[in-house]
Amino acid sequence: MPDTRRLTWRDRLYRFDMRYLPYLMIAPFFLLFAVFGLFPLLFNGVVALRNYELDDPTLPYWAGLDNFTRLAGDEDFWNALYNTFGIFLLSSVPQLLLALVLASLLNRRLRAQTWWRVGVLLPYVTPIVASTMVFSVFFSRDFGLANWLLGPFGGGDAPIDWRADKLHSWIAVATMVNWKWIGYNALLYLAAMQSIPRDVYEAAAIDGAGPWKQLWRITVPMIQPVVVFTVVLSTIGGLQLFTEPMLFDLNAQAATGGPNGEWQTIAQLIYKVGWKDLNLGYAAAMSWALFLIILVIAGINTWLTSRLSGGRT
Amino acid sequence: MGRAPQDTPAGLGTYLLLAVTILFSVFPLYWMFVIATSDDEALAMIPPAVVPGDRFLVNLEEVFSLQDVFFAAGLINSLVVSTVVTASVLFFCSLAGFAFAKLRFKGSGWLMLFVVLTLTVPNQLGIVALYIVMGKLGWNGTLLAVVAPGLVTAFGVFYMRQFIVNSVPDELVESARVDGATTMRIYRSMVLPAIRPALAVLGLLTFVATWNDFQWPLITLSGTDFPTSMVAISDLASGNYVIYRRVLAGAFVATIPLLVMLFVGGRQIVRGIMEGAVKS
């Protein structure tokens, strides 16, 4: 009976197709995430408890909590943490505020609408490596455009050495971050703004609210979920800042973030400890500490943002 | 008076402010080109040079002929890595997105939630262990180490699922089944044609992100003869005396493909970012 045999074969194929194929289709993501995402993150915790010095394999296998206790007393770590937060504040706050203003400009009825939107994305597609090199020249002490432009306003006698102290180097690095992300965030805000019902504005206008008041009283509260989203996004990004501080350094390969670590960030310090000092175990401890810090900050941020913008989540 | 902002014709002030914004966006790129086309003196002048010079080809030739930077290899590698990653992301993410959107299987809801949750895990924080894993696999220093972690992304799966839910009608899938079409057949002849716009968006975003990636390629590829273009630029910029006209000539060349993409696919990129925002 060849017919039934063919049927069972087709049955089996059908059953495979309906029951198992879906799992096969989603498997690549889960496999890849397990191997290159989740496992490294967890394994990082194990490495952090070990001596893993590439240049000294004779050390005892386990280090216990040594790496973490060393972290607590490590001035470089606290300095880098301080810098990271400083740069983060100088970048995320103006970035999101300016993005909001830009979005409200883009939200008007514009000629050549698409081209304005594409235009503000120019920084987003520019490689950070490339733009950082430009800004690096822009912020040079003797012949930099920044100092030349500031000339008429500043004291005038001494040019600003953007790489000499914390505040100036932070401003320079934050400028690069802001330049890159304002347009992108503006588009996120714009998307949310366009789904706000129009009659809300009509009612507000009748009550005599001008454009500025409308932005802060209506638009911002109504796009609050996206605001929270961008705050979380820029927190995660800001605390992992790497490329800009790396390449702003005139001696980038040293990964010190300035002669005295003026603008060395945590991500940069992890790179230095792991791949310049070859102490992977200690670097792993640092990245685990950073992971915990990000979790805490993201939590606080979400809570704070929802409180500040009306308490609706 | 009583109109919503999106119905109010923009005034002169709006256009002026937008024009200033665009100027700020363009200026670093323009200045990159200025320095890339200048000689050394142009960088040591007050006021600084703001007009392009005529030495672009000279500077470029220097960049490509440097013995220890491998810039040409970097460009080729970036092209290979970005193309492979983009093609793979499009294939695997559309498959998984299709499964999550239209196929019924046990646990699909939970598994999708898991995918979304992984979006919040900063992979970069496992970077030390990732390096060790790649070392065990023997992949450090090879393009495999750069390509493998990006072959399929949570964002891509999520994005594809959202799009397929809306653009492929359930009835169509059902009737194809009744006609005896297999799942892969449905994927090929119904899903793929319907999601072309989403493929374009995800492809552009993935290509840009992969091309621009720096930290992980730096860690795994630096010191090799086969860096990506971003690592090669950072090699150009290291050493005691950095020659910026070279660095920026290289940087400019490595930026051109992305500018072309923005010019060609700008509308799609904008839409992709805006749609991603509303749905998340």
Image (cartoon, coloured by chain):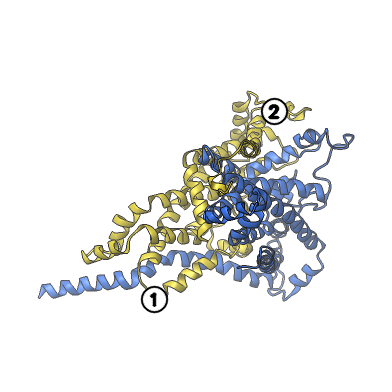
Chain colours: A blue, B yellow
Taking the image as drawn, is residue A259 in sight? Answer: no
Q: Amino acid at mark 2?
A: Val
Image location of residue A266, percent across then percent down = 72, 59
In this rendering, is residue A139 above or below B148? above
Question: Which quarter of the rendering shows the N terminus of chain A?
Answer: bottom left
Residue shown at the point (54%, 68%) measured from the top left: B117
Q: Nearer the viewer, residue A312 or B255?
A: A312
Q: Amino acid at mark 1?
A: Lys
Residue shown at the point (15%, 74%) measured from the top left: A5
Asked if badge 2 and badge 1 are on a common chain, one would say: yes
Image location of residue A228, percent across then percent down = 62, 62
Q: Residues within 10 Å of mark 2 (few under 14, many from 20)?
A: some
Q: Tell which subunit mark 1 falls on.
A: B
Q: Nearer the viewer, residue A195 or B250?
A: A195
Image location of residue A46, percent across then percent down = 64, 73
For label 2, the SS is: loop
Q: Tell which subunit mark 2 falls on.
A: B
In this rendering, is residue B56 above or below B215? above
In the image: residue B192, left or right of residue B263: left
Which residue position is annotated with label 1?
B106
Which residue position is annotated with label 2?
B50
Image quarter of residue A292: bottom right
Q: Nearer the viewer, residue A178 or A58?
A: A178
Residue shown at the point (59%, 46%) measured from the top left: B1
Q: Residues within 10 Å of mark 1 (few under 14, many from 20)?
A: few
Taking the image as drawn, is residue A75 in sight? Answer: yes
